[in-house]
Image: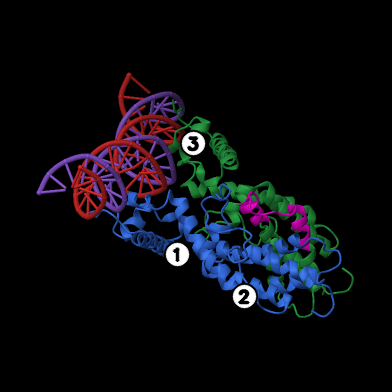
Chain colours: A blue, B green, C purple, D red
Amino acid sequence: MPPKIKSPQDREQLRLLILDAARCLFVERGIESVSMREIAKQIGYSATTLYNYFTDKEALLQALCDADFLALASGMQAIMQMPDPIGRIRALCQGYAQFALQHPSHYRFMFMTPKSPTNMEITQIEQGNTEQDAYAQLQQVVQTAFAAGVFREELQNSELIAQTLWAGVHGVCSLEIALGNEVWMQWADVQARIGLMQEALLRGLLKAEGV
Amino acid sequence: MPPKIKSPQDREQLRLLILDAARCLFVERGIESVSMREIAKQIGYSATTLYNYFTDKEALLQALCDADFLALASGMQAIMQMPDPIGRIRALCQGYAQFALQHPSHYRFMFMTPKSPTNMEITQIEQGNTEQDAYAQLQQVVQTAFAAGVFREELQNSELIAQTLWAGVHGVCSLEIALGNEVWMQWADVQARIGLMQEALLRGLLKAEGV
DNA sequence: ACCATTAAGTTAACACTGTTATTTTATATT
DNA sequence: AATATAAAATAACAGTGTTAACTTAATGGT
């Protein structure tokens, strides 16, 4: 059965086949209830083959999430070109939130699951590179707005401002992902929650003049 | 070895022994990396004995969290007596955040982990009872403030306001728990993040007059 | 043309998990 | 003293991530 030499393209193709199967199963059944054996069976290989392509399950997850978050960051590139700094902030928040709600499994793995600190040798993403790292994008946009003097006088730390905006949107999305189906909560519409979070925070952070 | 009849007090005592051991291990090593066998070994019983006291691992976790969140809610009772409605909101946010940071494992299990909707027959907590349910406390306090007309005119849904405040504080705390140790983030001080979230949100939600 | 090398993949196995069925044991009641 | 029974223990099942050992089959060198 096993033919000998595989061109780098073929290798990459199988790598992607694994990733696609894994993504599909994760989205269907949630991230930790799908096993390496299942992923392998789905594509007709044995479980051990996966270990020729990924050092372990976590590396596989990391690769999956890297791919999706590269997609997020590059989808945001258009927003980065918008003229109005505050409009950019709004659009980034919206884009981020919609991404989180559309990819709950990956979002959860990336931002809601404590892990041993990211192995920087393994991840594909260059942190701080605004083409790859969504937080770096937000930080940059906030920094620009800060330099333009739009924030209230007493706020002198643009990192703190960015982290607060992030935490706000993250809070809405992560509660939706974790508890959106809980019967004991009467949740308001999730888009309304995102919108109010965004606008209330901005109103609280920006100078008062007509927002 | 097994003596025969156990008084209800003795039964309850072993139940608590199990819960304490489990809590201890969970806090040490994180919630899903400790097994039923380890908990049992810790207290000198066999794993199967735990199943005489809890139907399964999830029920054990649920019991643990119920206990801690009852403690949270009852610790908040003093705050509920404060005279100033807005002061109450501030104090609730602070109390909630400090609790989250002091009990990260339990917080994560309760609010950061998607689960099949809570089994209402099993949980000890009466949802909506402000003596047991911290969200109900917040909801009530916000409702009171809302009735006093402190929020901006366009905000007509007090549930939405409460959920936004919750999401904000939750966002800061859950990011701290999940990513507080990530090397690629230069986090601002967590108390500063909590404070800014609280004050920015309040400024954005309350009527403008001198906050 | 043959053989050794080696990549690609498989099977078997290890040490673990949550959980259940079965069995032991020591007491309490008859 | 014999029996019934609550409390706990042992053994086992089906599953997990992962590693070691083995099987192919195509290539490169002679």
Q: CA distance from mark 2 to mark 3?
A: 44 Å
Residue closer to the observer: B193 or A117: A117
| Residue that lies at the very extreme toward the right in this rendered image | B210
Image mark for residue B38: 3
Image mark for residue A191: 2
Q: Secondary structure under badge 2?
A: helix
Same subunit, labels 1 and 3: the answer reads no
User: Is residue A18 left or right of A169 when viewed as pictured?
Assistant: left
Q: Quadrant of the C terminus of chain B?
A: bottom right
Residue type indicated by callout 2: Gln
User: Is residue B185 left or right of A72 when viewed as pictured?
Assistant: right
Residue labelled with disc 1: A27
Same subunit, labels 2 and 3: the answer reads no
In this rendering, the answer to whether B96 lies above or below B16 is below
Q: Position of residue B139 (x, y in %)?
A: 71, 65
User: Is residue A137 left or right of A86 when viewed as pictured?
Assistant: left
Can residue B145 be seen from the camera position used here?
Answer: no
